[in-house]
Amino acid sequence: MTLGVAEVASQFLVGISRSMILFVVCAGLSFILGVLRVPNIAHGSLYMIGAFATFSITKFFPGTTGFWVALVVAPLFVALISLIAERVLFCHLYQREHLMLLLFTFAVSLILGDLVKIVWGAEYRSVSAPPLLKGSVSILGASFPRYNLFLILMGPIVGVALWLFTTKTKIGKISRAAAVDREMVGVLGINVSWVFAFAFVIGCFLAGVGGALVAPTVSITLGMDHTLIIEAFLIVTIGGLGNMWGALVGSLIFGVTHSLGVLFWPQFAIVFPYMAVVIVLLVRPKGLLKSVW
Amino acid sequence: MKRSSCLIASAVSVLLLSFLLWPIGVVAQGPIKVGIIDTYSGPPTTYTYDVRDAFKLAIDEVNAKGGVLGRKIEFTTRDDKFKVDICLSMAKELIMNEKVDILMGTINSAGSLAVSEYVKGEKVPFIVTFSKSEKITGEKGHRYVFSITENTAMIGKAAAAGLAKRPFVRYWIAGDDYEYGHALADGVWGNLKKLNPKVELVGQSWWKVGEPELTPYLTAISAARPDAVIFATGGASMVNAMKAAKATGFAEKIPMFIHTATEHSTLAPLGLDAPEKVIGTSNYHFYYPDTPKNKAFAKAFKEAYGRDPKVGALYGYLAAQFIVKSIEKAGKMDREKFIDAMEGMKVDSPIGEIEMRAYDHQAMLPMFMGVTKKVPGYPFLIASDIVTIPAKEVMPSIEEIKKARGK
C-alpha cells in the first residue's frame, strides 16, 4: 500500500475532528470532576440524551433550520435535566466517598438509559447534517467530509468559550476557587451549593453539545453512552483530572492515534488509543497536565 | 365399610372427571395453536414486527374463509428480549402451558439453536423465522426444525455469485469484529475465491461492535484504493457505515457491497441521506418483483399497518403459508404427519414459488442483488438494477450439509 501525504493528512484531520467531539464531552466531565470531585458516569447518558433530543428537534423542525435549532436547544434540554438531577439527588451526596459516588452515578446512568428507552424507544435513529455541511471537500486530492471540518471548527470555539467563562467571569472564578478549596469559598460567604449546581449544569450542558454534534455522524442508539464514557474517563485521566487543557490533549492523543492506527495497521487499530493511555500513565501517572486534585 | 365407600366415591369421581374431560379432547375441535417466540423489545423490533404482522395478515385471511380443515388457527406471542434463557423458557411455557401445536421464531441465532435442541426432545415442529446462523439447518439440523429465512451460508453464496459477475479483482474486507461479521466475511470470501480464483484480498479492517465513527476506517480504506469493499456489518453498524460512506463520498469512488444495504429495513431510517451506488442483497423488496401477486401483498400490508413491508414480512407470510398448506396436506393436526407434509412442500409467495427442501428443512429462497438509487416518488432510496440470484445458486449443496452434519 502506498501512502501519499494527502492520505496521511486527511486521516490526521479525521482523527482531529473525532477528537473534537471527545474534547467537548470530556471538558464537561473534567470540569465537573475538578469543581465537584464527582466522577460522573451519568455524563455519557446525558450525551446520549443530547443526541436523542437532537433527533426529536430535527423531526420537529424539518428542513435546514432543524439542526441549528437542535444545536442550541438540545444542550439546554440536557442542562435542564441535569439541574433537576443535581438539586434532587446529587447535592445531597457531595460529601460521600468516591466509591459511593461512582456507584451512585452509575445507577443514575442506568436509570437515564431506561428513561431514554421509554421516551424514544429502542430503534436506531438517524439525523441528517444540514445541507450546508453535507458532502465532502477535496483536501490535497483526498476527499474530506464537510461536517468533520465543521467539527474541527467547533472544538476550539467551545474550548475558548469555556476558558473565557472560567477565567473571565465571576462565577467561573468562584467555581475554580471552589475546585481548589471549597471550605474557603464557603467561608467567604458564597453559597457553595449553588456554585456547585451551576458548575454541574455547565458540565452537563457540554455533554449535550457533544451529543448534538455527534448526532449527524452516527446512528443514535441505546448503548452509545457506555461506549463514550469509558473513553471519556481515560481521556480525562491521561490529561490530568479537572484540567480542561488536559482534556484537549487527551482527546487529541486518543482521536489521532486511533485514526492513524486505522490507516497504518488496521487489524490492531482498536488497541492503539489504549496503548497510548498505558504509556502516558506509566510515564506520568498523574496525567500529562497539572491535575487539580 | 368405611374404606370401601371411600374407594367407591373416588372411583365415581374419577369416572365423572374423565367424562368431563373427554369431550374437550376429542369431540370439540378447538383451534390449531401456533406459538411465536421473538424479540419484541429493543432494536430487533425493526425486523420482528414485520414477521408477526405479515403472519397475522395471512392467518386472518385463512380464518375468514373458515380456517384449515374446519379449524381456526390461533397464535400467541412471547417476547424473548433477545436473551437465550428467556427464549428457551418461553418455548417450554408455550409447549407445556399453552399446548401449542407448532412453534416459530426468533431473531436470535443462539436462542433458535437452544429452542431447536429442546423441540427435538419434545417432538414439536419449530419454524425459524429470522435467525441467520447456518448451523440451524446445517450442522445442528434435525427432523423438527425448519428455516424459512436466509442464513450466513446462503448470504455468502449469493453475494459471491453476484460479485463474481462484476469486474472487481482487488478486494478489501471490513466489518464488525464479532461472530456474525466474521462468519459473513468468510462465507462471501470463500465462495468468491472459488467462483473467481483471480480475486485478491488487499487488506482488512475490523472495528469493535458499536464503534460510532467509521469515517477514519473509510478514509484509510480509500487510501489503499481497492476495486471493491465487502462490508460485513449488521444492526446499528449498518446505519453508521452507510452514513460514513455518504459523508466521505466513499460510495461514489469505490464500489461497496453490504448484505441488506438495499433492504428497506436499512434504507427506510436513512431517508434520502443514504449513499447511492451501494451494492446490496436481500430476499425481498416490496417493489420487486413487479408482479400482481407482490403488488397485492405489499398493498394489503400497507393498508393494514400503514407502512411498506420489509423482508420480515416475506418470512411471516411464508411461515403462514407453509403451516396452512402442510396441515391441509397432512389431513389433520398431527405433528409427525405435519412434518412429513412440510418436507418438499411448495408454496406460492410474493417472490414466486418457494420450496421447503426435504433434506435439510431449509426454504429455498432466491436472493436479489441490487444497487441503491434515488428514485423520484420515494422518500427513501430503493434498489435498482436488480439481478435475481436463483435459489439453486444460493443454497448450500446437500453434500455440504451432509459434511457439516458429519455424515
Image (spheres, coloured by chain):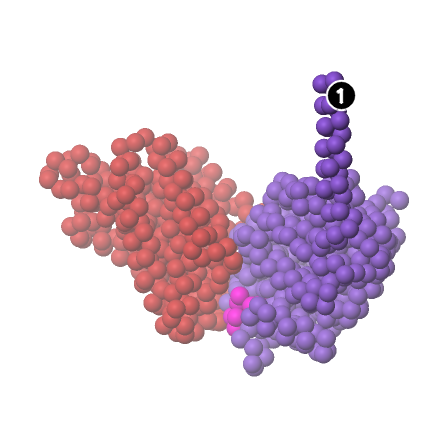
Chain colours: A red, B purple
Furthest residue toward front: B1
Q: Residues within 10 Å of mark 1 (few under 14, many from 20)?
A: few
* Residue B81, horizontal then vertical, whole percent: 57, 47
Residue A4, visible in the rendered structure: no
Q: Quadrant of residue B44?
A: bottom right
The front one of A166 and B4 is: B4
Measured as percent of width and height from the top left, residue B123 is found at 79, 44
Quarter of the image with the C terminus of chain B is: top right
Q: Quadrant of residue B380?
A: bottom right
What amino acid is labelled 1 in the image?
Ser
**Residue lying at the far left of the rendered structure:** A189
Residue B309 point in image, percent of width and height? 62, 68
Q: Which residues are magenta?
A: B267-274
Q: Is residue A275 left or right of residue A53?
A: right
Which residue bears the numbered disc 1? B4
Question: Would residue A44 appear left or right of B21 to someone viewing this image?
Answer: left
Which residue occupies 39% across, 35% down? A103
Q: Residue at x 73, y 65 (%)?
A: B66
Q: Position of residue B289 (x, y in %)?
A: 72, 75
Q: Nearer the viewer, residue B309 or A37?
A: B309
Q: Is residue A111 magenta?
A: no
Residue at point 56%, 81% (across, down): B377
Q: Is residue B31 above or below residue A242?
A: below
